[in-house]
Image (cartoon, rainbow, N blue to C red):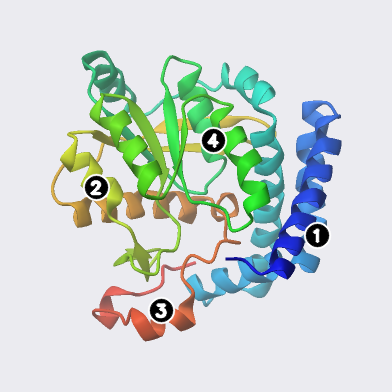
Amino acid sequence: MAKPRRLWLDWTVDRIARALVWTALRLPYDIRVPMMGRAFRALGGITGFRARAEDQLAYIYPDMPAQTRRRIARGVLDNFGRVLIENYSTADQLARAQAWVPDGPGLAACEQARAQGRPILFVSGHYGNYQAARAAMNVRGYEMGGLYRLMNNPYANAHYVASVEGVGGRAFPRDRRGLAGFVRVLRDGGQGAILIDQYFADGVQLDFLGKPAPTVLSAGEMALKYDALLVPIYAERQDNGLDFAVTVEAPIPPSDARAMTQALNDSLAARITARPDQWFWVHRRWKPARQARYFPPLDPDDWQSPKT
């Protein structure tokens, strides 16, 4: 049970966040979104998010100049702020999603699977705006719900769930009951979405951007068990800062859960390598000190950092 002081702090942080979001929502969409991006860039030094992003960039790209890390971190914070307010602007997001026409080599396979009543498991990461991809697919007849990790702040969790479900499909917490509901959707031939790039201490050691990262195998396991099409999908922010290119990649061929999950990691890593400012480097994806203790590299030659 959380201590009273922790609950009080969570309540305070949530009320500040609610006030900020409420204020931003009073403004036109094309003003509120860049405004939140600027606000998060400005607050990056105070919150520690900019330093965290730079630390993780240095861990993955040790030869990257500090000036480049700072520039990327600022872009990350700008995207972070934009994503936050976009995902609370569900009506506007759905309206704009009408123009975000999904494309890519996996789209035809998804259309065929949906017509046949075959389940589809879409997989993305904290890249661009992951919810924008769901919005673009759902306005075109999909019902892509999401499996989410319960937030540490219990006061923020309720309105976070409301924002997820606001673009269609149900939100399922990553606990026993939520997983059971998510599985029922797949078993009944529906569509679901999960994010692959969160830290799970009890995950399996897989390569991600050239470093070992504890990763859950649930995407591959569920795809195999329920004969679901396993499809990477991304919404990459465009130069105007408001719209997205939604790409549906080719489905991951069925093999075994570990190999399929590694393929998902590789897919996301390729996106990040091309556009590092679009990924949430503020997430503690690796926790290097802890991993050095619990997840030693299997072979030092296998874990070389990608070139900058």
- Give neighbour class at mark 1: few <14, some 14-19, many 20+ (Cα, 10 Å): few
Which residue is at 40% across, 42% downward?
A: 178
Is any part of residue 48 visible from this angle? no
* Amino acid type, residue under disc 1 in the picture: Leu
For marks 2 and 1, the one nearer the N-term is 1
- Please tell me whether mark 2 sits on a helix, a strand or a loop: helix
Q: Tell me if 207 is positioned left or right of 67 in this view.
A: left
Q: Earlier in the sequence, mark 4 or mark 3?
A: 4
Query: How far apart, in angstroms, are the residues tagged by discs 2 and 3?
Result: 23 Å
> Is residue 6 or residue 281 the one in the foreground?
6
Q: CA distance from mark 2 to mark 4?
A: 21 Å
The CA distance from mark 4 to mark 3 is 30 Å
Query: For mark 4, what is the residue?
Result: 131
State which tag comes first along the sequence, 3 or 1: 1
Tell me the residue at 26%/24% (across/down): 189
Question: Which amino acid type is marked by label 4?
Answer: Gln
- Element type at marker 4? helix
Q: Is residue 220 above or below residue 307?
A: above
**Amino acid beneath label 3:** Gln
Choose the circle earlier in sequence order: 1 or 4: 1
Mark 2 or mark 3, earlier in chain:
2
Marks 3/1: CA distance?
29 Å
Q: Position of residue 30 (x, y in %)?
A: 78, 29
Mark number displayed over residue 220: 2
Q: Are marks 2 and 1 in contact (CB under 8 Å)?
A: no
Is residue 126 visible in the rendered structure shown here?
A: yes
The image position of residue 42, as x and y in percent, is 82, 57
> Residue 111: which quarter of the image?
top left
Image quadrant for the N terminus?
bottom right
Name the mark on residue 43. 1
Helix, strand or loop for disc 1 = helix
At 64% from the left and 59% from the top, the residue drawn is 72
